[in-house]
């Protein structure tokens, strides 16, 4: 069974005005499957439709057409049953009245008929101090930690996290990643959106890239890198650049380009050729002072797949 | 979790919200202060005139018949829409709580809050009234409290219904004001008369047809007035509706009860129907 299944989902927002209405298509005929047990990263630039997709998963909004199934249930007809088994960290949430952090966590535990200890959840996300203050007084990052604790209540089968690291300090972001892994090891499927590639790469099994309301790629990051083409590079800083070695390297299999910028050389090649390139210069009369290698940069990858916002 | 358990949880927490936000204290404070002050001044006036003192409930009825719709609308018109614009609904609806529970649960919790204020106020007025020699008729006392509870529930339903329908707090406030003018200030009674005037070629017909009085009776304030007038004919004031000397069936207490219940169902039904499919 898939954890999430979107079929032909289109979402149009219509705004009525005095001089006719305007329509924005946030999602266009989207098909997306998230397998049970995986960590799925949902990527896309601002305005690509990530939050809209999550709104549809949680029944915050209804699709204009298409079907949304979560954990085998149709969201349109069984939304409360679905939400019994998922943990949610939505975008654009706010505190419920003047309730404290602990009130929020207890409310979630009770609503899910779970037997978690609120203190355990609060400890786990690292917000023990402010738990007894009204959430309205929290900083963004602290509210984000609290909402993660709320999402964790009742050991959900699916975690839906919308931009979870927004506002978190580096420690918080690390805690977030650790919890995502722990929950996944427990057996939960994790679906989270982000526009920060590095975070996605650190934890995700697969990623989907959304752009302009359409899914432009779904795969593991490695596979996406490969598909995007080899633009890995080795940069060597040398005492001098031996011309014969440069010619030799240029002829190596997998080398695309050699660029000389005395006293350093940048070789564009695929990953497999990197070692041979370094060895060739090491064996030459020149002294190798420094070596840096890079993979296809995540920004490059991101840029290659995305181009803009919803039309 | 069963829907009933979810509803019970939502009502309990929403009621606790009215405590956390001091809303309940404020409501009880206003009711008790008004009730005790009025009873005190009535008692002093009765003592000075040394005639027959009016029953305790007469003054409270007149005062709270006006105050209750006003306070219910003023306090509760933002109940749902405020949660929507703050994003709190995203937290609530991210949990296994459905939208019907939000609308109906808010109505129940806020009704309980205002009913508590009414009951506490009447209870506080009794010793003051007795000390100043105002007679208390137990049957009338219970009847007036019950009628006010029903009135409070009706206007709470109207407030929660419109709060579930609109998208911003500003519109909720405007709509609540409109509802108060429509029902309390009898704008409602003008509507059939305007329709009649227009239908009759912009002039008044010689006799007013029966259906105009029927439409009048559908105003919740009219229904409330007919209900109390039918049970306790000596109580008066409090509303702009004059009860008829010889009520027809739609001006009887039984029909009035049905009208009030109908408004509760209609307001919550429309509120839920609009809220059920709306995008947060």
Image: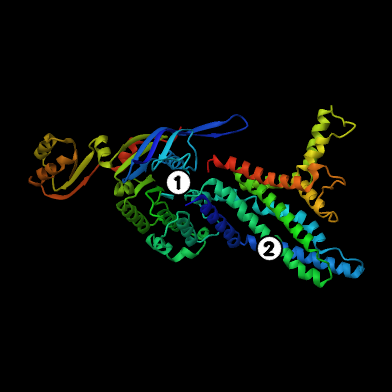
B244 lies above or below A66: below
Q: Position of residue B172 (x, y in %)?
A: 65, 46
> Residue at the location (72% across, 44% down)?
B259
Q: Nearer the viewer, residue A291 or A193?
A: A193
Mark 2 and mark 1 residues within 8 Å of each other at the beta carbon: no
| In this rendering, position of residue A31 left or right of residue B277 | left
> Residue at the location (16% across, 36% down)?
A254
A10 lies above or below A115: above
- As helix, strand or loop, the secondary structure at mark 2 comes to helix
Residue occupied by mark 1:
A81
Name the mark on residue B28.
Answer: 2
Closer to us: mark 2 or mark 1? 1
Chain letter of mark 1 equals A
Q: Nearer the viewer, residue A112 or A133?
A: A112
Q: Position of residue B275 (x, y in %)?
A: 57, 42
Q: State how many labels appear.
A: 2
Marks 2 and 1 belong to one chain: no
């Amino acid at each position: 069974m898939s954890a999430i299944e979107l079929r032909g989902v289109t979402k149009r927002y219509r705004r009525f005005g005095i001089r006719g209405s305007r329509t924005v298509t946030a999602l266009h005929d989207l098909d997306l499957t998230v397998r049970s047990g995986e960590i799925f990263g949902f990527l896309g630039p601002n305005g690509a439709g990530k939050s809209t997709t999550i709104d549809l998963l949680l029944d915050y909004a209804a699709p204009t057409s298409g079907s949304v199934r979560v954990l085998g249930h149709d969201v349109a007809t069984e939304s409360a049953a679905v939400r019994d088994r998922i943990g949610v960290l939505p975008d654009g949430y706010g505190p419920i009245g003047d309730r404290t952090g602990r009130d929020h966590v207890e409310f979630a535990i009770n609503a899910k008929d779970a037997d978690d200890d609120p203190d355990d959840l609060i400890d786990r996300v690292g917000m023990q101090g402010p738990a007894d203050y009204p959430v309205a007084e929290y900083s963004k990052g602290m509210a984000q930690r609290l909402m993660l604790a709320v999402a964790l209540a009742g050991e959900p089968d699916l975690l839906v996290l919308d931009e979870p690291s927004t506002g978190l300090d580096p420690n918080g972001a690390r805690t977030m990643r650790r919890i995502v892994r722990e929950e996944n090891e427990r057996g939960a499927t994790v679906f989270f959106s982000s526009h920060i590639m590095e975070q996605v790469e650190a934890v995700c099994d697969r990623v989907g890239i959304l752009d302009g309301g359409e899914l432009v790629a779904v795969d593991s990051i490695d596979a996406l890198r490969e598909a995007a083409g080899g633009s890995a590079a080795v940069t060597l800083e040398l005492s001098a650049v031996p011309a014969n070695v440069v010619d030799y390297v240029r002829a190596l299999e997998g080398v695309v380009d050699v660029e000389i910028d005395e006293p350093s050389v940048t070789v564009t090649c695929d990953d497999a050729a990197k070692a041979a390139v370094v060895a060739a210069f090491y064996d030459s009369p020149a002294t190798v002072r420094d070596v840096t290698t890079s993979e296809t940069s995540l920004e490059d990858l991101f840029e290659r797949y995305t181009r803009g916002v919803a039309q | 979790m069963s829907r009933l358990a979810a509803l019970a949880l939502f009502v309990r927490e929403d009621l606790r919200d009215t405590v956390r936000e001091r809303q309940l204290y404020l409501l009880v404070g206003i009711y008790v202060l008004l009730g005790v002050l009025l009873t005190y001044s009535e008692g002093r006036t009765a003592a000075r005139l040394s005639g027959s003192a009016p029953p305790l409930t007469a003054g409270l009825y007149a005062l709270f018949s006006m105050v209750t719709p006003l306070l219910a609308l003023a306090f509760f018109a933002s109940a749902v829409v405020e949660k929507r614009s703050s994003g709190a609904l995203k937290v609530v609806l991210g949990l296994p709580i459905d939208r019907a529970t939000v609308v109906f649960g808010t109505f129940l919790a806020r009704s309980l809050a205002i009913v508590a204020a009414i009951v506490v106020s009447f209870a506080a007025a009794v010793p003051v009234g007795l000390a100043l020699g105002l007679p208390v008729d137990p049957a009338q006392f219970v009847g007036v409290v019950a009628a006010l509870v029903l009135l409070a529930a009706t206007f709470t339903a109207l407030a929660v219904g419109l709060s579930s329908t609109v998208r911003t707090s500003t519109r909720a406030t405007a709509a609540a004001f409109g509802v108060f003018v429509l029902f309390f200030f009898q704008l409602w009674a003008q509507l059939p008369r305007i329709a009649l005037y227009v239908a009759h070629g912009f002039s008044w017909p010689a006799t007013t047809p029966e259906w105009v009085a029927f439409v009048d009776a559908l105003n919740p304030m009219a229904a409330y007035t007919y209900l109390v007038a039918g049970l306790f004919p000596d109580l008066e004031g409090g509303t702009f509706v004059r009860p008829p000397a010889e009520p027809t069936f739609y001006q009887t207490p039984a029909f009035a009860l049905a009208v009030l219940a109908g408004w509760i169902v209609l307001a919550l039904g429309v509120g839920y129907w609009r809220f059920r499919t709306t995008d947060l």
